[in-house]
Each structure stands twice: as structure tokens, then as C-alpha cells.
Image: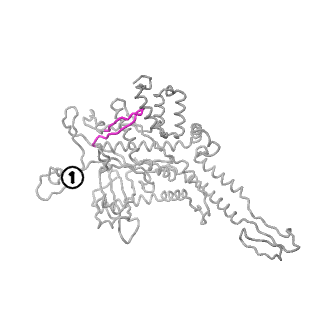
Amino acid sequence: MKTEKKNGAERLAFFRALYESAKHAYSDILDEFDKNMAQYRGSLDIDGGKEKAITVRNITYEIVESQVSSDIPQPKVDSATYSEEKTRAAHAVETLCRSLRDRLNFEEMNDIDERYTYIYGGSVWFVEWDSTADFGDVTGGVRVHCISPKDFVPQPNVYHISDMEYCFLRFITTRAELSRKYGVKDTDTYLADFETSSEYFDDGDTVSVILCFYRGDDGNIGEFTFSGELILSDIENYYKRKTKVCKNCGNVPDKCLCEGKKSFITCDVDFEDVNDKSSGRAIKKVPYYTPKSFPLVIRKNTSSEKSLFGQSDCKYIRPEQQAINKIESRILQKLLRAGVTPIVPEDASITLNNSVFGQIIKMKPGESMAQYGKVDTTPDISQDIAEAERLYEHSKRILGISDAYQGIGEFANESGVARQLRIAQASGRLESKKKMKHTAYAALDRLIFEHYLAFADEPRKMRYKDAYGKLHNAIFNRYDFLFFDTGTLSFRYDDSYMFSVDLNGGSEYQREALWERNLENLKSGTLGDPTLPTTLLRYWQCQERAHYPYARENVEYFSELIEKEEIPYANESGTEI
């Protein structure tokens, strides 16, 4: 994208106009997003009519919530070509991504991501490097954010984020955060784009911040951030290392010997000095790793033609939801108008009111009960109920959701394994949604890997658990990926690793089904002789990985028992170790 050298005001005007133009082109999709969310929340609106429904049976909420999964895909990393060194490096990347699943709030992000995906048709993930993050023994690490599609504005008519020249993110922050993060003076914060107007400015006032990622003429990623009339950041090379140097001598501040008033500018740093492990001498001209893609990942629900996001579940069952709202409203109107109307003689000495109890009818001498009667106007709503249920079943079939998938119906008392098999057979049409989630997480892990290659100067210590439940240390060191390219006679980083999802990580199955399957393996002898402590230890290690309650205590018990009795472990081939 052409971003010519301009002064601050001209650049601000350029990016603001670009944002408004892209947002205008995106307006129809934003309107559709609003309709989808309103439908999920139980809107009374009827498409194409001014009258609203008087009640809602929210099948959209029920169906969306039935699909929400708390499972977080686990990473799997393989080297493009085999060697022991590359296999160890791939394992280090895999352990790094796995450890971040626990360190970052992935449970909370996954929870909102699931709903974004089914309601809007997709979600946006944003990865950034936080150099101030404190992780105990090291400083700096990635931050991961799950963002609503309503806060993402893409380049118009481009349907893959890798093909875009620019895109925008919108964040809501406080006036105080502008001062802390971007160094805005308190006296200048009134120039920001405030979300709410207030007579007094305080820390509670929220402002809208627009962040633009763009691709420069050289292919490098740039970032421009603004709010109202404020330019918060303008970085032409977003991933490049930065340093301050003297305008006159070109040295960093510590080595500047210029006299008088000193002036420093920020410059990109392309190379670093790295020590040769074999000789201890510094190797010159080792480039920093520079990612080439936007730090964003789009998760789709299911793919749609000429669409950045996927198909929204809300959109495809909206006709059924609207029809059910009309029917349920009609049922309610019928019931409200229904009742029993008494019939009394003309000369009856009683008056009727709307109360149900408390009336006493006193008959005159000579009167007969036959003179009194009633008109029952209670309606027959059985056909309305049947039609509403038919539409409900229709909406579930559209999305491929069965009673077995929702855990209701006559299959509710089946065993976990049988229920899981039935669900797998019934949810074939939901498989593409699962694949799209796996694809997004694989792309997310690649972005995390690239950020650590670019910015993690210190080795990262991590721990992992082997098949025997023993803890081991692993280290991610970006220099392990540095090699000398004999073709170009220069050093560069090897990022040719393949990212996917570990299908054996337990995320594909319900926990109850895994617990039953592990127990069956123990009884059948698959894990070894069920009477041996080593087999029982292996069984409880499997249960611990499946998060069985109190499994950890049993692992510790059998581990200690085996150590006291000096019972040798055995590997998978049966050889004692």
C-alpha cells in the first residue's frame, strides 16, 4: 500500500479517510452482525413488519449454546524435513505453545470465541508482543486477544487476510490508559474520540482507539494508531527492532560523545551480534527474524463464497426463529382471550366480574340449575404447538444438530462411550466447524512461534510431562533455529515448521467417555496386568490426563508404592527401565 512520507496531520487524515471508507463498505455486514446478536438475545422484531412479537421462544440461543465447547485444541508441531535436531526444536515449539495455553486465559477467550463464531460466523484473534510482561525469570512475552468481528474492519472486497494490504482493529480504552501506554499528555486527551460524553473528564471516560495494520511497499508490516485528533503510534516497520541513535554521530545514547544539546532519533535494527558456541567469538551480521504476515487470525464457522468470515448459524435459522415467534405470539394471544363466560337468566339477582373465586350464586325459590349455563371459549392450540415443534426440528436439521448431540431424548441414559459414538455419527455436518477451529488454532500457534523467533532474546524454560507422568524441563531458544544458508552465504532463521492440532490431546472426546475408555483398557489388559502396581499407575496417569477427580493422589500413591517396593517401570515394548 502506498504510504508516502507525509507530516503527521496528513498521515492522520489519510488513515482516517481510509478507515471511514472501509467501514462504509463494511456497513451491510455490520448491520447483519447486529441482527444476528439481537436474534441470539431474543429480539421481538419481525422482519418486514412493523408489529413485534409479544413473546419469544429463543431456539437460536438454545441451539447456539448446545454447540459451545470448552475444549481447547492442543498444538502439534512437525519439522518440514527430518533430523534429530529439528525434531527437538519442533518439540520445543510445541511445548512453548502448550505452556501458553495454561499461562494465558485461553479458557475465557475460547468461551467468547465459540459464541462469536456461531453468532457472527467467525472471530478475530490478535497476537502482540508485550516487552513489559513479567514472567518471573524472563521479561517479555505474547499477549493473545479474541476480538469481536464488529471491532474488525477489513480491506473491502478482499476475502483472505493474507491478501490484504490493510485492515483495522477497534479497541475501547480509558483516558488514563492513553497517558500510560501512549504517553499522551493529560491536557491533550480531550482530542481523543470519546465513546461517552461527560461534563467532567475522569478515569472512567472511555475512548475509541483505531489500530491499522498495513503492508508497505517493501512488504514489511506497518502500524498506525489514532484516536480522534491524536496520533498514538506510527511505526513503518512493526516487527523491526528499534533503537535510539544520535542524529550527528549515529551512536546509541550510551556511546554518544557529542557535545552540547543532544538529539536522538529512533531507527530500525536489522542485525545483531551472536556469539559462536564453538569459538566464543561474536558472529557479525546475524539478522533479526522479521515476520511477514499480519498478527491476526480469522476463525471461520463454515466457509462461505466471497466472504472473509464464515456462515452464521443465526442467519440460516432466522426464518424458523421468526415463524416460531409468530406462532408463539398467536398461542399466547389465544390463551389470553380464552375463558369461560357464564350464562344466567335475565332476572338473575347476581352481577358478574372478572374474579375467579369469591363469587356465590344464590338461586331463587323455584329456579333450576338448568337455567344457568356457560360458553367455553378455550382454543385448541395443539396444531400451533405441533407446527412450532416442526419448525424447531427443522432448524436443528439445517445445522446438523440432533437430540443425541444435545444430550436430550431417549439416549440420555446411555453410557459415555455409546453416547459419544452416537454423537459422532449424528454430527457429521458439524465436522467442518471443528476443522475450521483446528485450522485457526494452528495459524495462531504459528503466529506465536514467529513472535518468539523475532523477540524472545532470553531462553524460555518450560516443563512438560512424559508418558509416565514424570516432569521434564524443556527450553525454547530462538538461536536453535538459526542456521547458515550455504546458498546465500548468510545466516537466517528456519521457520519451515508445520503446525496442526494434536487429535490425541483429549479435546475430541467428552471427559466421561475418556474415563470409561481408560477403565475398559485397564480391565481388558491393554495397559498390562491389572493386578500390578505399575499397570495401575499407568491407568491413573491416563485418568489424570483426562482430568479425573482425585487422579493425582492415586498417581502419587502408586508412584511411592513402586519406589518403596523397588518395582521397575517398563516402557511400551516391555523392556524394564
Amino acid bearing label 1: Lys
Region in magenta = 457-476
Figure check: 372 above or below 16: below
In what quadrant of the picture does the C terminus appear? top left
Q: Which residue is identified by label 1? A: 244
Tell me: 286 left or right of 62: left
Rendering coords of residue 473 (x, y %): 34, 36
Q: Who's the residue at 39% across and 42% down the image?
A: 445
Who is closer to the viewer here, 311 or 577?
577
Rate crowding at label 1 as few (under 14), some (14 to 19) or many (20 or more) other CA atoms within 10 Å. Answer: some
Residue 37 image position (x, y, % from top left): 52, 57
The local secondary structure at tag 1 comes to strand
Q: What residue sits 66% from the left and 62% below the top?
A: 332
Q: Is residue 419 visible?
A: yes
Residue 452 quadrant: top left
In the foreground, 77 or 286: 77
Q: Is residue 355 above or below residue 494?
A: below
In the orientation shown, which residue stands out farthest toward the top?
575
Q: Main secondary structure of the magenta part?
A: strand
As drawn, is 212 to the left or to the right of 332? left
The extreme left residue here reads 259
